[in-house]
Image (cartoon, rainbow, N blue to C red):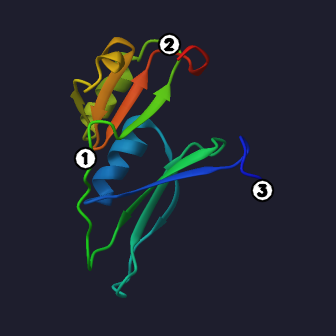
Amino acid sequence: MPADATAHIRIARPSRDLRAAERFWASGLGLDVLYQHAADGTPGQSSLLMVGWPDAGWHLELVHDPAAPLKPQPTTEDLLVIYLGEPVPNSLTERLEQHGGKRVPAHNSYWDAWGITFQDPDGYLLVLSTRAWANS
């Protein structure tokens, strides 16, 4: 596959708690669980949770190594932005908060003007943008 717009993207991040991550990303945001794997205790083997929409060109992989867990170290600029192209439904905001998300102000006021920012259970930021990608 060429390195162009048809290439699939995997965003991989460490997670402290894959169950909490699954609640937020799958039950809260509505992503599908595409793959899960629980480590069996073998050194160097990680538990994985891959979430995304089946037809999307990207997915999020969350990794936890029980023998040597990495602490997530997100910054204020580590954003996953989803362009909705419409107002964020109140039901989605409530669902994200009920499933472990915390609504937070954005570091960059642009995102407060054009969306809502949530912190996931590992501290990473999800922005639901009211803008459409074409006019961002």
Mark carried by residue 1: 3
Amino acid under label 1? Pro
* Residue 81 screen position, x and y as percent: 44, 31
Q: Nearer the viewer, residue 49 or 131?
A: 131
Instruction: Give the residue number, with chain letter if any, for mark 1.
Output: 121
Amino acid under label 3? Met
* Residue 95 screen position, x and y as percent: 33, 30
Q: Earlier in the sequence, mark 1 or mark 2?
A: 2
The residue at 73%/44% (across/down) is 6
For residue 70, side relative to residue 84 (left or right):
left
Quadrant in the picture for residue 25: top left
The residue at 52%/17% (across/down) is 136
Q: Earlier in the sequence, mark 3 or mark 2?
A: 3
Disc 2, SS: loop
| In contact (CB < 8 Å): disc 3 and disc 2 | no
For the residues labelled 3 and 2, the Cα–Cα distance comes to 33 Å
Disc 1, SS: loop
